């Protein structure tokens, strides 16, 4: 995937391979300090797609004469594999870091969480994701985990 | 981290996927199943109906006995004839296995038949409004135009695969459990984490 200086992407989408991720399931706030409750998941391969929004204007005859397009934030759906049926699903608005197929770290926001389905072998939940914009190095990552 | 980077995980998952593929193709093969060396039919809806009427603990849950195992094997056997007590007695006399072998064999047979059965969600407290046969017939007849006899003739392992595709047509975001490969993926990840002090 081609990248422009500053690690911004200039093509239509982002592809991710199946990977292990850790996401906050909704922690607790004590004395004004938020402590996340992290949970490990397997994030199945998925893609984020980037579209465009267009504004149009027309002349007095209703014929379009101007248009202006803006790139939208990359979004997509993904499936998380849970350890078992009792494993908590991630919290909406939780942020986590995933690695795209080029090896770049991308901060994602959980925007929707579906219902968990499972059996004695495994459990899964479908989530919707948005790429976080204006990221510095602020994504939450469990401090106890070591990088591999 | 990318799971493919975990040593041995990709190979183990590929092997499990191969086994799933075999099971899925077998469902459409028309071949007989084997339970502890005994040739039986692949599980179909009429078998499930009969097992339900016979209150089989293998279907309804409960204590598994030698008698319930023998009844199960008789119902799925190629010799089964409804109401033929003499044939049933001859069949039971003829199968010379130990109870534990029967039970383990039947469990494996059922696991194979239900490989692609849908996963359950959280119990919603509502009672079922129709039986399982009605669900199969409604969904598959609507999608493929099959009749009840045609649906009854198909192994449930094949019907569950069709149901998956129908669900996917209805909802491209539908989620499915692959009992062998999904389980293997978690197991290998856990083993690796333990071995590496995560």
Image (spheres, grey):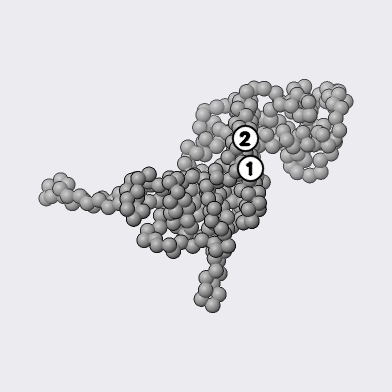
Q: State yes or no: discs 2 and 1 in contact (Cβ < 8 Å).
A: yes
Given residues A50 and A144, the one toward you in this image is A144
Q: Which label is found at residue B184?
A: 1
Residue at 77% over, 22% down: B79
Which element carries disc 2, helix, strand or loop? helix
Up/down of B158 relative to A97, above or below? above
Residue at 71% over, 26% down: B33
Specify which label sits upstream in the sequence, 2 or 1: 2
Q: Which residue is mark 2?
A: B15
Query: Disc 2 is attached to a residue of which chain?
Result: B
x, y percentage for residue A146?
56, 58
Up/down of A138 relative to B161, above or below? below
Up/down of B84 relative to A29, above or below? above
- The answer to which image quadrant residue B37 occupies is top right
Q: Is residue B23 left or right of residue B55?
A: left
Q: Are marks 2 and 1 on the same chain?
A: yes
Residue at 78% over, 36% down: B104
Query: Disc 1 is attached to a residue of which chain?
Result: B
Residue at 35% over, 45% down: A2
Q: Is residue B184 visible?
A: yes
Up/down of B151 relative to B195, above or below? above
- Residue found at the far bottom of this picture: A31
């Amino acid at each position: 995937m081609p990248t422009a200086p500053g690690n911004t992407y200039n093509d239509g989408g982002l592809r991710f391979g199946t990977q292990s991720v850790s996401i906050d399931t909704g922690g607790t706030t004590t004395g004004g300090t938020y402590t996340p409750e992290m949970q490990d998941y397997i994030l199945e391969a998925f893609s984020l797609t980037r579209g465009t929004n267009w504004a149009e204007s027309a002349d007095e005859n209703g014929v379009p004469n101007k248009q202006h397009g803006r790139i939208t934030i990359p979004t997509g759906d993904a499936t998380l594999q849970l350890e078992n049926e009792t494993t908590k699903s991630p919290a909406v608005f939780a942020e986590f870091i995933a690695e795209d197929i080029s090896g770049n770290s991308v901060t994602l926001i959980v925007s929707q969480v579906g219902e968990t389905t499972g059996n004695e072998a495994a459990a899964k939940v479908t989530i919707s994701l948005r790429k976080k914009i204006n990221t510095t190095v602020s994504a939450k990552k469990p401090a106890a985990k070591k990088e591999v | 981290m990318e799971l493919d980077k975990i040593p041995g995980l990709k190979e183990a998952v590929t092997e499990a996927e191969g086994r799933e593929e075999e099971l899925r193709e077998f469902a459409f093969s028309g071949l007989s199943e084997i339970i502890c060396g005994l040739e039986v039919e692949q599980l179909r809806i009429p078998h499930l109906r009969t097992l339900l009427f016979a209150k089989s603990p293998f279907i309804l849950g409960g204590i598994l006995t030698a008698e319930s195992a023998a009844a199960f094997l008789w119902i799925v056997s190629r010799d089964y004839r409804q109401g033929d007590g003499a044939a049933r007695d001859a069949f039971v006399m003829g199968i010379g296995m130990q109870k534990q072998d029967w039970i383990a064999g039947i469990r494996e047979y059922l696991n194979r038949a239900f490989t692609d059965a849908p996963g359950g969600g959280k119990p919603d407290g509502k009672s079922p409004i129709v039986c399982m046969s009605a669900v199969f017939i409604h969904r598959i007849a609507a999608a493929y135009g099959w009749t009840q006899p045609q649906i009854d003739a198909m192994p449930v392992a094949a019907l569950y695969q069709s149901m998956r595709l129908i669900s996917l047509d209805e909802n491209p975001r539908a989620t499915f459990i692959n009992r062998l490969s999904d389980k293997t993926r978690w197991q290998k990840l856990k083993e690796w984490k333990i071995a590496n002090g995560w």
